Image: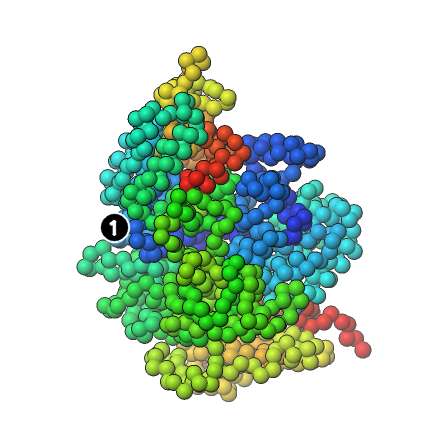
Amino acid sequence: MSSFSLSYLKQLESESIHILREVVAEFKNPVMLYSVGKDSSVMVRLAQKAFYPGKFPFPLMHIDTGYKFPEMYEFRDAFCAKIGAKLIVEKNEEWIAKGCHPLKTGVDKCCSLLKTGALLDALRKHGFDAALGGARREEEKSRAKERVFSLRDAFGQWDPKNQRPELWDIYNTRINEGETVRVFPLSNWTEQDIWEYIKLEQIPIVPIYFARKREVIISNGILIPVLSGAVDAHKKVKSVLCRFRSLGCMPCTGAIASVATTLDEIIGEVRSAKKSERENRVIDLTSDSSMEQKKKEGYF
Amino acid sequence: MPIADKSLLRFATTGSVDDGKSTLIGRLLYETKSIYDDQYAAIEKTSKRKGFKEVDLAYLLDGLAAEREQGITIDVAYRYFETPKRKFIITDTPGHVQYTRNMVTGASKADCAIILIDARNGVLTQSKRHGFIISLLQIPHLIVAVNKMDLVNYAEDVFFRIVREYENYSQKLDIHDIVFIPVSALKGDNVVEKSKKMSWYDGTTLLHCLENIHVAADRNLVDFRFPVQDVIRPHLDFRGFAGKIVSGTITPQEEVIILPSGKATTIKSITTYDGELTEAFASQSVVLTLSDEIDVSRGDMIVRKKNLPQIENNLEAIICWMDEQAMTINTPYIMKHTTKYTRASITKIVYKIDVDTLHRQPADTFLLNEIGRVEIRTSAPIFFDSYKINHATGSFILIDPLTNNTVAAGMIRDAVRHIEDYEVDKTFDGGKSKKSSNVIRRGLNIELEDREKQNGHKAFVLWFTGLSGSGKSTIAMELERRLLGRGCRIALLDGDNFRHGLCSDLGFSSTDRKENIRRAGEVAKIFFEHGSMVLCTFISPFAKDRYFVRSLFPQGRFAEIYMSCNLDECRKRDPNGLYKKAQSGLIKDFTGLSSPYETPATPELVIDTESCSVGECVDMIEKFIISKSIVPNKDISL
């Protein structure tokens, strides 16, 4: 008799597929939020698996701030065309036109307008009742408190003190008029699981995850790419071998010094990492509970 | 170890407010190097600001601003770490406020639970409540970590006093695997490193224990259940049913039945993105296609023709009430059970359980966090197994149709049996296994507990498996004499004798062997229910058949004893001259020669009958029985 047991990666995969299928079966108009990063790539593959040999069952939606890396836009368009998914791109055009920028407007405010605001507007505009996101509990302390199916009120807000109980694999997907649900099929995955899975499944990812020489300036220990336009003119530009561990907007996403040019090297690096994954994300560093605050406002 | 081979363990932690739960988790994460420098720096800062000398790892866990402000844990938090052997998912459940709601949420999927007890305070009411909920949820393994041993001078008697007190309590619960470990989370004793200060403790560390808990046997691989999630229909030539196999295994060509329609067909293929499978098993998400065009939709269940769940709309269940609004009788709530929604009303409260005393009380409502037994009527029949043998098909939630809140978690015990229900003939044709569907299964007249009290020992089944000549009968007979001397009530079911009587109509094909073992299991069950120790000696060569027998008994009440003996040695012994006959061709399908023997992968006990004497073998088994508290440990040398 075979052992009838699944490796932990396959267990995570099966759990995520179960969640994705529940969403498609029970919501009227679900959407998958697509941020172009590695977690999104994994989430897309899981959806392909969940509905195979059927078609990709929901549109992908990218909330664009206009400040993403050029490689991300290139990758996004090619990737979505290849998998045959419908791509919706939404922006807060009004505030982008007004010149909203983290350095001028402030990081928190810029995020609130260009990401949270744009997301809530887009969900309303398209009438989406469930939005799948690639957030993981391991990433950040307030995310560690999230349910898989996270209920949001009519304003997209999260009430962490009053979450629905979530039992076994039985998800309560019922919502009242105006409410929406954020669903996190990767809740139980860690950064390392994501990379192991990308390797196992040969999932395409944006090339800036790999190390190469980049022109940066070093500010408070964070490597800021010159390309970002967020560079203080008084600081010296250096050419450093580095990569991006997680992807966000250029002005707020630092690189990390790294020699990892292959998946195996990245996995090795993640395994022995001394710092957490979002160390280079300016958005998390503004206060002790900045992520919780953003989530309460409707962020992921 | 290659990463892909690592196994996964989900465990829940719980304890009272100051038992040091967060510190313990912090310690596990810290010592397995799962805390990043920047996270550590942040909690170092917080600890300093609060005026602590040592870094309090507890701050790592409080994810919400309100939790950090008030120094309490509000809701379940999830943490992840790994060792070279295993990946771990921790669900950290708060022990005080709303503990039922939180514990049930956090622990419903756990393989194992850790209860923390403060060595200075001993066993508090809280620790008992937590044990009760773990028993209700049927979490297979429990570790009681007696913490803050550093504050009681690492005293042995303090630890054992707590062990005894907790064991006294847990005997009343349905928990079968308990381990007690003395630790100091703050100082790190017996968490990851073995403590030098407690040389009197000869057990393992907490991490070692977590790494070695055997979880594979906790799954139900017998009853194939496939609740349909979605229909996949990309084009006219493909119609597949997506879902997760929640228990059992399946292969193409197997005969199945679709519930509730009762239509029969066979599995055509098991389709996945990674190719078609020749076999699939519990916890895999797959797409099944069927040989016939049958109407199947979400909420239906695909099961094996000869292994059906119960199909009823009057259920008896234990529920935990989780809503601020009290439960009301006869209100039509919405039930979600597997992938199916139905209307469900609670028609009767059988009793409410006082979680502190375990006393049963009459009640007419349940308030937030209250637990009890109820009868429920659903608008359509649901397909279920009792929660005890199948968590996935035995659990449900209730939803308030007005607020859409999840108001209760339920665990099904059985169908409600009222006389009037039997007069209506169930028209459902469930195939052969329902040959006598009008026969009523009666509950036990006298509870097992009462019989055990009278006997002075627990009911238990010892299943001896091994090749012919491996010593099963010899050792079982000696053990029987020994247990009789201890005043036990015993039944010895001998495989050979069965073949002469009850099973004289059966041969030795794998189907007949399966039936032979099934009958043996059912007979053992009757003796078990009457409080006996049942010794069964059957070659039982197939793991699946042995697994079936195991599934008939509560966890912890069945032990597989593998009589390990080399084939050559068995052949030499040949007590009944059977090997000789088989070799000369007089017996076909002889286990070990012309028919396979599947060695048990995880027996409770392996007895090496080749190198041990009969007496030594019996000693070992006797010791095992005593260690499981089946019989009281008293010397009977008169």
The number of discs equals: 1
Residue A215 quadrant: top left
For the point 57% across and 77% down, the residue is B536
Note whether B127 is above or below B223 in the view shown.
above
For the point 58% across and 79% down, the residue is B529
Going by the image, does A216 lie left or right of B470?
left
Residue B293 or residue B7, whichever sits in front = B293
Note whether B543 is above or below A10 in the view shown.
below
Amino acid found under the numbered disc labelled 1? Lys
Going by the image, does A64 lie left or right of B132?
left
Residue B169 or residue B501, whichever sits in front = B169
The residue carrying mark 1 is A55
- Expressed as whole percent of the image width and height from the top left, the position of residue B441 reads 48, 82
- Expressed as whole percent of the image width and height from the top left, the position of residue B452 reads 66, 77
Residue A210 or residue B424, whichever sits in front = B424
The structure's colour scheme is rainbow
Going by the image, does A61 lie left or right of B321?
left
**Quadrant showing the N terminus of chain A:** bottom left
Residue A295 quadrant: top left
